[in-house]
Each structure stands twice: as structure tokens, then as C-alpha cells.
Image (cartoon, rainbow, N blue to C red):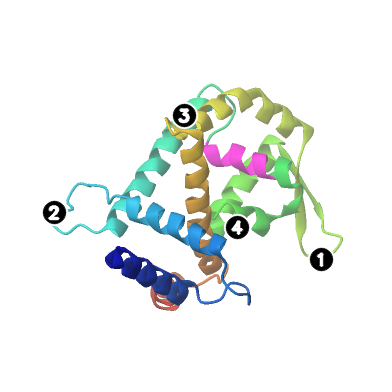
Amino acid sequence: MNYKLVKNIIDLVQQFEIETNKIQGRDLEKEDFIAWIVKSNTVLSVQEPQWEGKEQGRSAESVISTLLVQLNRYAKLYSKSAIADSDFSTQEEFIYLINLRAFGGMTKMQLIQRNVHEKPYGIQIINRLLAQGWIEQVDSLVDKRSKIIFITEAGNLTLESQMAKIRQATSVVSGNLSTSEKMELIQLLNKLVNFHQTIYEQNLDTTELLEVAYHNHLMNSN
């Protein structure tokens, strides 16, 4: 008998029990062990990529931050091209309209926060849309001090006239990723956005934002 193999298997089972303990209050089954083995092999098979400056100590976090900024800039270039021959001045204008068409009427602040803009900048965009007649505002039935913004028929028509090019721009942004890669990226980006959304909703002052985000959120999540 290959006792070394048996010992390795016993060690593996022990590690499995330590890492998983109990699953939802029930005893562990053979299927749980198999799933754990598959997951472990998947994690181990992920190879660490190379990146510029890695040998000089550049961190993975630095690379991620830079790549996200670059992707945002590329996306803006394609969006700018998509509205080049239209009545839109900026990509934010059609993004605001898309949000109103997709999610219905909302307050100014809800629309601004959905697009992660600062209030003064968001108000400028809303005022331009009002001036164009692409949105309208009515008194809120819940809070008379608030206005609810809706997309108008003119806004819908203007948006629809550019949707073919806008869809082309969004397709180009996802580039040459396969369907499975797109699904995986969506999961990762959703996780990242949810992390930052929690911080954003606190409406922190700029002077304390980084400190709170780093110490209260990032460190506690590790």
C-alpha cells in the first residue's frame, strides 16, 4: 500500500475540514470535498500576470488603478465619437437621459448620485438638458420641496437617434473579451463598485474621504 499517498489524502481532508468547518450547520459530504478540491485547483491555476514596473516594486493595486483610469479615458473617446454629429455636448447628457428612460423619474440628487457626480457638476448637466427640452421637472408628491425629473418625448427621440452609435461605442469598450471573460469581469467590477458605493453614500467631506475609505473600509475588508 502507498502509505505516503494515504497520508497526503488524510492531510488534504484535514485541511478541507479546517477551511470549511461546517457548511450551513450540516455535516460535510463527499460532494463538498470534491467542490473544494475543484475550487482549490482553480485558485492555484491562476498565474500572476506580468506588468510594467513589477520588478521595481510596482504594486498590483497601482496597476489596477491605472488601468481603470485608462479604460475610462478610452470609453470617453468612443462616446465622444458616438455623439460627434449630434445635438449632445457631452456623454454625460445622454447617460443622464438613458438613466431616466431606464429607471423612470427621480429627484435631481438621485440622478446625480446614480452617475457618481458632485452636485454642482450634476446640476450643470441637468440645466443643459432642461434648456434643450429633453427633460422636465414636476413637484414631488412626497416632498413638495423636491422636483422629480422625467425624460420628455423630445429627449427620447434625440436619444433614440444616437442609440445605434452609442451601442457601437459600448461594444467597442468591451473589446475582444470572450463571453465568459465578460461575465467574469462583470462580477469583479460589481464587487468593486459595491465596495466604493458604500463609501460614496456616506457623503464624506473630501478632507476625510481617503482616511475613512482606507482605514474604516479597506482595512476592515481584508
Residue named by callout 3? 172
Mark 3 element type: helix
Mark-to-mark CA distance, 3 and 1: 42 Å
Q: Earlier in the sequence, mark 2 or mark 4?
A: 2
Q: Earlier in the sequence, mark 4 or mark 1?
A: 4
Whether residue 96 is situated above or below residue 31 in the rendered picture? above
> Which mark lies nearer to you, 2 or 4?
2
Label 4 Cα crowd, 10 Å radius (few <14 / some 14-19 / many 20+): some
Mark 1 element type: loop
Q: Residue at x 30, y 68 (%)?
A: 3
Q: Is residue 160 magenta?
A: no
Check disc 4 and give the amino acid type. Answer: Gln
Check disc 3 and give the amino acid type. Answer: Val
Q: Position of residue 60 (x, y in %)?
A: 28, 57
Mark-to-mark CA distance, 4 and 3: 26 Å
Residue named by callout 1? 143
Q: Residue at x 71, y 33 (%)?
A: 155
Residue named by callout 4? 113
Mark 4 element type: helix
Label 1 Cα crowd, 10 Å radius (few <14 / some 14-19 / many 20+): few
Q: Position of residue 44 (x, y in %)?
A: 34, 55
Q: Residue at x 77, y 53 (%)?
A: 148
> Which mark lies nearer to you, 4 or 3?
3
Mark-to-mark CA distance, 3 and 2: 32 Å
Which sits in the foreground, 87 or 214?
Answer: 214
Residue named by callout 2? 55
